[in-house]
Image (tube, rainbow, N blue to C red):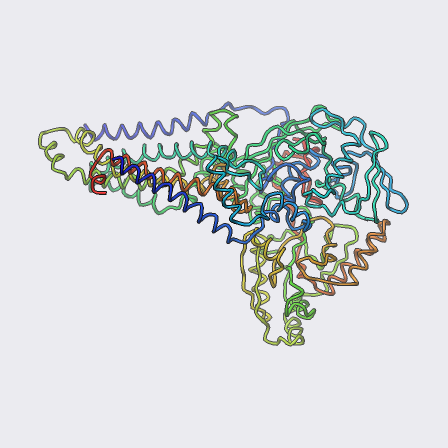
């Protein structure tokens, strides 16, 4: 029976393949009784390296901030400045001298003491001529750093800087040691409650609890950050149980299915990501405020938020997040009104509208918002040609080269309204009024006065309709229901897991 | 045979050099400043300038091209801009995943396709043949990434047998590492197997029509023996040629499959490096791939020439 034999041979071949699969699959099944002490955190992008003082990639901070490295001060889950490596500090009355007192038992992961010499080294390195710190400007006001004793650091500023403590809480201001700083990109050494274990390039970074940490011990013994960029793969990894918590989950259309599944919890919080229709204020016809106001009236933010973010996200009327003190609600200044928009265009001498281009960077929110906005602007006669771009050309041509009419991007740096005062920023916006308020902000320490000044800046930007102010990017976290303590909001780009535990 | 070998090797060297030129020129033409990509939207211009100088991007292009090619000849592939690591080491890390993946896929694909193709040829026009042809048609029509997603949905999400992707690293042990490679290898192998099965079938049918096979059948040899002893060896030449050609498809398929399964292999490295504008990595990986594909095809040619001297004589 040759036919049957051949069929049998085939069946054996297939069986062998499946058997191999089965043998590889069958692992020991562990019964979970005690709460788990490991956590797998999903991230969209892999950090290029692990030195937050030498790169702007948010993914670096998302792995290392507060977990591995500590700055002098740090940002907590509510966005407030709290003690970091410095347990307390004093500011002189003129706002020019900051005295930091370091934690007594603080040590680097290599066992060396974290003292004032390390702080002096870190700050001088960040502001030095050779520095490649992405936020060198944060350190620009520093005139000198002194270390009167091993536990005290005195920083003098050349001019008052109202955001100094806030900036010193950023990952860019992480305190590193002279003997390990050079190798931090691959083998990071910090002072935080977790230390580096290994990095499987392209896949994961593993941190383990630092047994010698002088502060409160985290509940987790091991944290693995896994990098999954594809939206479908993110959903699959969560559903397959590979990932315990996925913060900054931006596949918004998948949120309902996780909300309906009892095994998962979905949290939607705030970020610092003001999403704007970036407008080249130097180019015709956008140099005419009436044209910019017409566009503001032509954009229906509600539809945009429903369409792009599936309803998750707050509308903004200026460049400031609604959750932050000092916020002024200006969303009513330009209500959706296509007729008003057409009238304003006619007033500006463009009764038939005009043609323009919209250059879109890769993020999904940008691409989707761009399509919708092009359709909305078409309603009032503005014919928009969409040009999707990759990151590198976008940065080169739009951001650096200012070669664009319109673009669409979220600005995720916290408290970054000051970018409107930079003379060479890509909006090409110049306002004496705005800059005068900015100068006063730098001289002001009193929180109430600062908030009033921030309000004034917001009004100026809204009245000038510098950009199309659209919405705040939400921060959605999808995780197993038993995970507790992940941040709901994203006051900075960090995955602080020091307070995370399993139920 | 020697002249043939020399000619093949010269072609290989020329192709490699042309590849370096084309890759360098294309990347030079694409706008984008790697320093800016690394430092992002809030970077100060002086920090960007400092980084550019540190990375040597301020040097003119002929100097950079000469430095790159010269370095490669000495085995120095440069330093990745994003990862701040030697490219050779990065590539070696990634090859440790992509090579086993491609190997596993090749074995799976040949292991499935050759028996299936012979089986179909043996029963031309009947139900078994029809089924193999249908499988082949489907494998060619279904996009690889879609098939990969189906595998994940079934074996990872529904059944929970496999991780939905990722790679634990070889240091985690051969078992977990191979387990992570199995689904991607299947995703990579099946579309290849579909094509290969059809080619094996056709090659076997062609051979079956040859005089010597008819003679063997007329002698009263069982069909099974005829297929194995007379048909298979001769049908293997076109199959081997296609297997060699398929190597480049495997590499291209690996880029897709590695991205769906988030496997940190060479394809994914290339994909990410393009996104991050890590030019030195893109250049080196593309040239490496081009040289490998050309070299594999040359090897197949040489192997076929060794089996069957006719093309060698005619060439």
Vertical placement of A156 versus A20: above or below?
below
Q: Residue at x 85, y 51 (%)?
A: A444
Say which quarter of the image contains residue A339.
Answer: bottom right
Q: Position of residue B236 (x, y in %)?
A: 25, 35
Residue B111 sits in quarter: top left
Q: Measured from the top left, where is residue A66 in percent x and y?
A: 71, 35
Q: In which quadrant of the rendered image does the N terminus of chain B lie?
A: top left
Q: Quadrant of residue A405?
A: bottom right
Nearest the viewer among A343 and A268 is A343
Camera sees residue B127 = no
Task: Answer left or right for B11 relative to B254.
Answer: left
Q: At which x and y percent is residue A432?
A: 78, 63
Q: How many marks?
A: 0
On the question of residue A27 being in view, the answer is yes
Query: In the image as oriented, which residue stretches furthest toward the right?
Result: A93
- Looking at the rendered image, the quarter that the C terminus of chain B falls into is top left
Query: Residue A25 appears at what percent x and percent y?
Result: 45, 27
Direction from residue A342 to residue A6 in the image, left or right: left
Using residue A472 as the reference point, say whether residue B199 is left or right of it.
left
Nearer-the-camera pick, A293 or B307: B307
**Image height of B202 relative to A151, above or below:** below
């Amino acid at each position: 029976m040759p036919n049957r034999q051949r069929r049998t041979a085939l069946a054996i071949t297939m069986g062998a393949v499946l058997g191999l699969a089965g043998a590889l699959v069958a692992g020991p099944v562990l019964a979970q009784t005690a709460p788990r002490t490991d956590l797998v955190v999903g991230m969209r992008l892999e950090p290029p390296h692990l030195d937050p003082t030498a790169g702007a990639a948010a993914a670096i901070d998302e792995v290392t901030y507060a977990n591995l490295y500590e700055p002098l001060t740090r940002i907590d889950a509510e966005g407030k400045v709290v003690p970091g490596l410095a347990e307390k500090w004093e500011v002189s009355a003129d706002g020019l001298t900051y005295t930091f007192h370091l934690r007594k038992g603080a040590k680097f992961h290599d066992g060396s003491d974290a003292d004032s010499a390390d702080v002096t080294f870190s700050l001088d390195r960040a502001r030095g001529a050779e520095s490649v710190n992405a936020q060198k400007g944060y350190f620009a006001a520093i005139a000198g750093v002194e270390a009167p004793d091993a536990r005290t650091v005195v920083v003098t500023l050349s001019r008052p800087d109202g955001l100094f403590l806030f900036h010193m809480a950023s990952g860019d201001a992480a305190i590193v040691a002279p003997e390990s700083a050079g190798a931090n990109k691959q083998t990071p050494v910090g002072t935080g409650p977790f230390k580096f274990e290994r990095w499987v390039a392209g896949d994961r970074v593993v941190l383990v609890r630092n047994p010698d940490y002088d502060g409160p011990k985290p509940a987790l013994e091991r944290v693995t950050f896994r990098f999954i960029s594809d939206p479908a793969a993110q959903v699959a990894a969560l559903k397959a149980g590979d990932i315990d918590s996925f913060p900054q989950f931006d596949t918004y259309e998948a949120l309902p299915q996780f909300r309906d599944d009892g095994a998962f919890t979905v949290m939607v919080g705030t970020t610092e990501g003001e999403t704007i229709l970036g407008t080249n204020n130097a180019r015709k016809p956008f140099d005419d405020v009436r044209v910019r106001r017409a566009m503001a009236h032509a954009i229906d933010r509600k539809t945009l938020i429903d369409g792009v973010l599936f309803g998750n996200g707050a509308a903004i009327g200026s460049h400031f997040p609604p959750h932050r003190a000092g916020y002024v609600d200006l969303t009513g200044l330009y209500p959706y009104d296509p007729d008003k928009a057409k009238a304003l265009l006619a007033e500006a001498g463009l009764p038939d509208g005009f043609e323009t281009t919209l250059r879109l960077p890769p993020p999904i929110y940008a691409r989707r918002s761009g399509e919708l906005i092009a359709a909305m602007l078409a309603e009032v006669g503005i014919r928009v040609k969409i040009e999707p771009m990759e990151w590198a050309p976008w940065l080169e041509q739009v951001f650096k080269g200012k070669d664009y009419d319109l673009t669409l991007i979220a600005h995720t740096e916290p408290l970054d309204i000051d970018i409107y005062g930079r003379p060479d920023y890509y909006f090409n916006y110049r306002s004496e009024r705005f800059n005068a308020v900015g100068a006063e902000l730098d001289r002001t320490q009193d929180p109430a006065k600062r908030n009033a000044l921030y309000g004034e800046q917001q009004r100026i930007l809204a009245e000038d309709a510098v950009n199309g102010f659209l919405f705040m990017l939400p921060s959605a976290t999808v995780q197993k229901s038993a995970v507790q303590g992940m941040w709901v909001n994203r006051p900075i780009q960090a995955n602080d897991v020091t307070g995370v535990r399993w139920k | 045979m020697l002249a043939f070998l020399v000619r093949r090797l010269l072609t290989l060297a020329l192709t490699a050099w042309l590849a370096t030129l084309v890759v360098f020129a294309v990347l030079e033409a694409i706008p984008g400043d790697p320093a800016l990509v690394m430092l992002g939207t809030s970077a100060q211009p002086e920090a960007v300038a400092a980084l550019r100088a540190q990375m040597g991007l301020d040097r003119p292009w002929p100097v950079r091209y000469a430095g790159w090619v010269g370095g490669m000849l000495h085995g120095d592939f440069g330093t990745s801009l994003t990862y701040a690591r030697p490219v050779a080491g990065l590539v070696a890390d990634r090859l440790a995943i992509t090579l086993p993946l491609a190997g596993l896929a090749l074995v799976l694909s040949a292991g499935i396709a050759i028996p299936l193709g012979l089986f179909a040829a043996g029963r031309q026009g009947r139900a078994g043949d029809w089924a193999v042809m249908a499988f082949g048609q489907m494998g060619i029509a279904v996009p690889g990434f879609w098939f990969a997603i189906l595998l994940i949905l079934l074996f990872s999400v529904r059944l929970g047998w496999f991780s939905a992707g990722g790679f634990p690293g070889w240091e985690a042990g051969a078992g977990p590492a191979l387990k992570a490679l199995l689904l991607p290898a299947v995703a990579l192998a099946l579309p290849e197997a579909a094509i290969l099965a059809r080619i094996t079938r056709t090659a076997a049918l062609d051979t079956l029509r040859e005089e010597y096979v008819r003679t063997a059948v007329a002698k009263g040899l069982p069909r099974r023996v005829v297929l194995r002893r007379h048909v298979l060896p001769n049908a293997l030449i076109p199959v081997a040629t296609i297997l060699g050609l398929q190597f480049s498809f495997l590499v291209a398929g690996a880029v897709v499959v590695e991205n769906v399964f988030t496997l940190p292999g060479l394809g994914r490295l290339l994909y990410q490096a393009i996104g991050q504008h890590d030019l030195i990595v893109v250049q080196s990986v593309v040239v490496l791939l081009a040289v490998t594909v050309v070299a594999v095809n040359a090897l197949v040619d040489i192997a076929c020439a060794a089996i069957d001297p006719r093309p060698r004589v005619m060439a």
